[in-house]
Image (tube, rainbow, N blue to C red):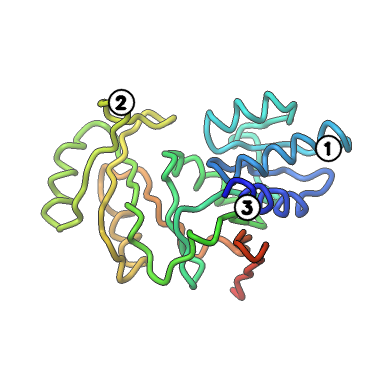
């Protein structure tokens, strides 16, 4: 599987050209994309500026000598390559399995060419089997959990080593075990208007290219939107 992810990551790196501002994603597949950009910077003299989506990716990029800028210091990103936890046929997706969904969406929003790199297991007919991450402020989070429980969303605070996971932005994540999301746009709209929710892992209609690594090789899916 790692070999497939590497192929997808290296394929995505081909869309990066000299002089670009590049969004550097987080996760096991995006890792290989960042590694390839680092190799090209070192061996080919590629001149780019990276904008990272997590402290983990920042550390990786710095170790590879990729020049970085803060999301506050840019207006437009030429291309961002990131992973996804699920992708449906309408190019809607769930992200945030690694806990970086807020930073990932902040970087994705000003991006001209937004690309996901995934292995074929991430392609689904309907979103929801993967638990939907919802990033919430700590204050009032217990009440918010009860609100989600009352809606039948089967919520749970994300835990790491027996403690509540805290994001790079200092928030908690509540994972919703929905099984199936009948209307991804309606759910996104509901969560967008829920007080205490900072961001959610539904990335609907944002991506325009999905690079899929599978047993038969690499496939590039393009949105017609």
The residue drawn where x is 78% and y is 39% is 48
The reply, left or right, for residue 32 in relation to residue 142 is right
Give whichever of 1, 112 is nearer the camera: 1
* Numbered mark located on residue 215 in the image: none
Check contact, mark 3 vs mark 2: CB within 8 A.
Answer: no
**Image quadrant in which the C terminus is located:** bottom right
Which of discs 3 and 1 lies nearer the camera? The answer is: 3
Q: Say few, some or many: other residues with alpha carbon within 10 Å of mark 2 (under 14 / 14 to 19 / 20 or more).
A: few
Image coordinates of residue 206 in percent, x first then y, are 53, 60
Which of discs 3 and 2 lies nearer the camera? The answer is: 3
Image coordinates of residue 9 in percent, x first then y, are 67, 49
The reply, left or right, for residue 48 in relation to residue 93 is right
* Numbered mark located on residue 47 in the image: 1
Alpha carbon of mark 3 to alpha carbon of mark 2: how far?
Answer: 30 Å
Which of discs 2 and 1 lies nearer the camera? The answer is: 2
Answer with mark 2 or mark 1, whichever residue precedes in sequence: 1
Image coordinates of residue 26 in percent, x first then y, are 55, 40
Alpha carbon of mark 3 to alpha carbon of mark 1: how far?
Answer: 27 Å
- The residue at which mark 2 appears reads as 161
Alpha carbon of mark 2 to alpha carbon of mark 1: how far?
Answer: 40 Å
The residue drawn where x is 62% and y is 56% is 114
The residue drawn where x is 77% and y is 53% is 14
Dot 2 falls on a residue whose secondary structure is loop
Dot 1 falls on a residue whose secondary structure is loop
Answer with mark 3 or mark 1, whichever residue precedes in sequence: 3
Give whichever of 134, 211 is nearer the camera: 211
Give whichever of 197, 46 is nearer the camera: 46
Q: Say few, some or many: other residues with alpha carbon within 10 Å of mark 1 (under 14 / 14 to 19 / 20 or more).
A: some
- The residue at which mark 3 appears reads as 4
The reply, left or right, for residue 138 in relation to residue 133 is left
């Amino acid at each position: 599987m790692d070999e497939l992810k590497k192929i997808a990551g290296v394929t995505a790196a081909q869309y990066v050209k000299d002089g670009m501002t590049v969004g550097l994603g987080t996760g096991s597949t995006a890792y290989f994309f960042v590694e390839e950009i680092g190799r090209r910077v070192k061996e080919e003299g590629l001149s780019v500026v990276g904008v990272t989506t997590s402290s983990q990716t920042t550390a990786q990029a710095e170790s590879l000598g990729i020049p970085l800028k803060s999301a506050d210091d840019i207006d437009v990103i030429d291309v961002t390559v990131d992973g996804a936890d699920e992708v449906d046929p309408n190019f809607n997706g769930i992200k945030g399995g690694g806990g970086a969904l807020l930073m990932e969406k902040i970087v994705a929003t000003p991006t001209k060419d937004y690309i996901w790199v995934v292995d074929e297991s991430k392609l689904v007919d309907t979103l929801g089997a993967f638990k939907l991450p919802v990033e919430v402020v700590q204050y009032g989070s217990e009440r918010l959990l009860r609100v989600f429980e009352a809606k039948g969303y089967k919520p749970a605070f994300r835990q790491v080593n027996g403690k509540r996971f805290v994001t790079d932005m200092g928030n908690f994540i509540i994972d919703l075990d929905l099984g199936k999301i009948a209307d991804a746009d309606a759910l996104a709209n509901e969560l967008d208007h829920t007080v205490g929710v900072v961001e959610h892992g539904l990335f609907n209609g944002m991506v325009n290219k999905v690079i899929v690594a599978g047993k038969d090789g690499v496939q590039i899916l393009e949105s017609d939107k």
